[in-house]
Structures are given as structure tokens and as C-alpha cells.
Image (cartoon, grey):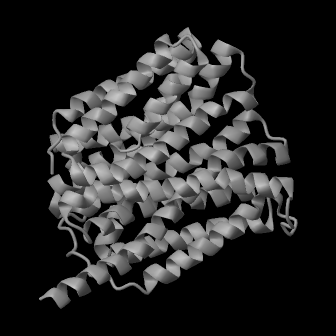
Amino acid sequence: MASHAQTAGKNTLLQFIPVMLCFFAMGFVDLVGSATNFVKEDLGLSAAQAGFIPSLVFFWFLIFSVPTGMLMNKIGRKKTVLFSLLLTLVSLIIPMFGNGYYTMLIAFSLLGIGNAVMQTSLNPLVSGLINPSKLASTLTFGQFVKALASLLAPYLMAWGAAALLPTFGLGWRVLFPIFAIVCLLSIAMLGATPIREERADKVTGFMECVKLLSIPFVLLCFVGIMCHVGIDVGTNTFAPQILAERFGLSVEEAVIGTQIYFYFRTGGCLLGSWALAKLPAKAFFSFSVFCMLLGMAGLFAGTTQTIILASIACIGFGNSNIFSVVFAQALNRQPDEKNEVSGLMIMGLFGGTVFPLAMGFAQDAIGVSGAVAVMTIGVLYLMFYTLKIKNA
């Protein structure tokens, strides 16, 4: 009996390692933000042309998330993840052979499509490997691994741009072959790992899938994901602008706001992977939302740079675990439609387009405080959502 338990534990660990490497590959999509600045400079693009590049990523989440849920029912979750990794690999190879505007649009489009497919399929694949009570903590650890790739990308690009070592003429684009090698390793490891999957979900039609939003809790989770991503993208975009507007910092100096956010978000994921395995989900989620509310208050009323940076840190830490808890709650509440629910939740990442647009209009009307007000609405919604959470 003990031997069987040890074997099962060993098998779980062997499955866990390649799956976490896939989470690292999932983080490749965050290179788009930093890469856009380099593409803009290389090609002399206008702000509108450059801004179109990252918007492609969120657009493909809207289009491909739900169909991916249906695809999983036909070919399985593991094969769908492998397909997403293949798309990602192709997207990373393309920029090695050219850096024209349309070439980069094609590459980043494929990266966005691959990431939409990966996020939709990888999370339910994980749910089939572990106890439902551990799902939130495991997904949070996956988000921590993903964040490591997000943090690494700007440094690799800066290294390539500075040409501290030979980059074979690629410059900042040396990032792409490095990540392509990791992607190949992910494909090889996951492909060689035996994973016994759950039976296919019963829902197969597109409209049947979308109709799951008529289930009140699924709709609540969908909007919760939109708020999480809206706050995430909004803070990254507007935190430097707040610092620049209130304290006269240059663009280069104001970037510290984004850096603080990412550092505390990454640390929050690591802490959350432990806390969610030990504490009730509802209690930790409530604490996370409180941290964000405190941060929003600081952005409104803060009069010193220290207070603003501390507020950004609170938002980064609080927002680090929202996605994992909401996603796990949705999957555990609808265990017979995990694939479809996953597709709907990932489609909610389209909030990364909706929120910044609303924040931009609000900023034009009353300044950066208007943008903060839009994000605060998202935090207040998450406070309401807290009342609906189960501790499991």
C-alpha cells in the first residue's frame, strides 16, 4: 500500500514539472509589452501603429477561448496544450527572420492565439491532476512560474539591445530564440509525460457553451476575471502616468511604478500558492481585495511618491491571486463542463481591452483620478464577489 502511494506521488511530481514549464511558456506573451517599444523605435512607428500590436493579444482571447473549450472535448486537454505550444513556437521563430511591421503583427498574432489556447487548456489539465481543494493554490503557483518569464523578458531584451555578448545580429530579438528553445523543451517534456485525462465534457456546441453564462455563478466569475485583468492592465498602464502627472517624473523614471507592481504581484503569487493551501479561500480572497481597495485609496489621496508606490505595491500583491481563486471556483462549481467553463473564463481576459478604454475616456475627462475610479469599480465588484465564494 505504501509503495503504491509512493508511486502515485512520484507520477504526480513527474507530471507536475512539465506542466509548470508550460506555465513558464505561458508567460512569453508578456514580452509583447516591452517588445512593442523596441519595434516602435526600430521601425519609426506612430503611437497608434505601435499600440495596435499589444491589442492583438487580447483580441484573440475573445475569438479563440470558447472554441478551444470545444476542441478539448474532441482531442483532449494534453493534445490541445501541445498544439498551443506549437503555435507559440512558430510565433517565436518568425521574428528571427525579419522585423518588418507586418511580420511582427503576424508573429504577435500567433503568440496571442497560442496563449489563448494555452490558458484555456492548461488550467483544466491541471485540475485533473490534483485534488479540487488544492486547485487554487496550484494555479497560483503556476501564475508565479508564469510571472518569472514575464520578469525575465525585459532583461533579456535589454541585454540583446546593449549587445553585451554576440547576438548574431538579432539585437533585442535574441529573446526569441532563447524562448523558442524553452518552448521546444516544453513540447518534448509534456509530450513524453503520460497523463490520464478525465472523460470529455458533455457540452459540445458553441451556443451551449455560451449559454453557461446564464448560470449566475459562472457569470459572476466571468465578470470577476474581466475585473482582475482590467485592474492588472490598467495599473501597468496608468501607474507611470500617475507618477509623471503628480510628481513630474520623466517616462524613464516613472517606469518604477510598473516594476513595483510586477515585483509585488510575483511575490504575491508565491505567497498565495502556500496560503491558499493552508487558509480558507474566502478569507484569503477577502484579504487580497482589501489590499487592492487600500491601494486604490492611496492612489486617490496619496500626496507623496512613497505613498503612491506603496499603493501600487498593495494592488500588485492583492491582484496576484484573484485569477486563480475565481478560476478554481468556476471549475469546481461546474465539474461536468470544465473545458467550456475554462474557455469562458479565459474569454474574460478581454477585459484587458475593455477597462483601459474606459480608463482612457475617464482620464481625458477628469485626469488620472478618473482612471483610478474605473479600476476602483472593479475592486468593488470583487468585494461583492467575495460573498459568493466557497472555502473549498
Residue 323 locus on image (x, y percent): 35, 46
**Quarter of the image holding residue 374?**
top left
Is residue 336 at all visible to an observer of this figure?
Answer: yes
Q: Nearer the viewer, residue 290 or 361?
A: 290
**Quarter of the image holding residue 178?**
bottom right
Residue reaching furthest to the front: 2
Residue 154 higher or lower than 76, as above or below: above
Q: Is residue 167 left or right of residue 223?
A: right
Residue reaching furthest to the left: 1
Residue 240 locus on image (x, y percent): 63, 27
Q: Nearer the viewer, residue 307 or 167?
A: 307
Residue 197 locus on image (x, y percent): 26, 77
Tell me what residue is drawn at x 68 percent, y 28 percent.
254
Residue 202 higher or lower than 137, as above or below: below
Q: How many marks?
A: 0
Q: Is residue 316 left or right of residue 13?
A: right
Q: Nearer the viewer, residue 363 or 127?
A: 127
Q: Quadrant of the N terminus?
A: bottom left
Is residue 373 at all visible to an observer of this figure?
Answer: no
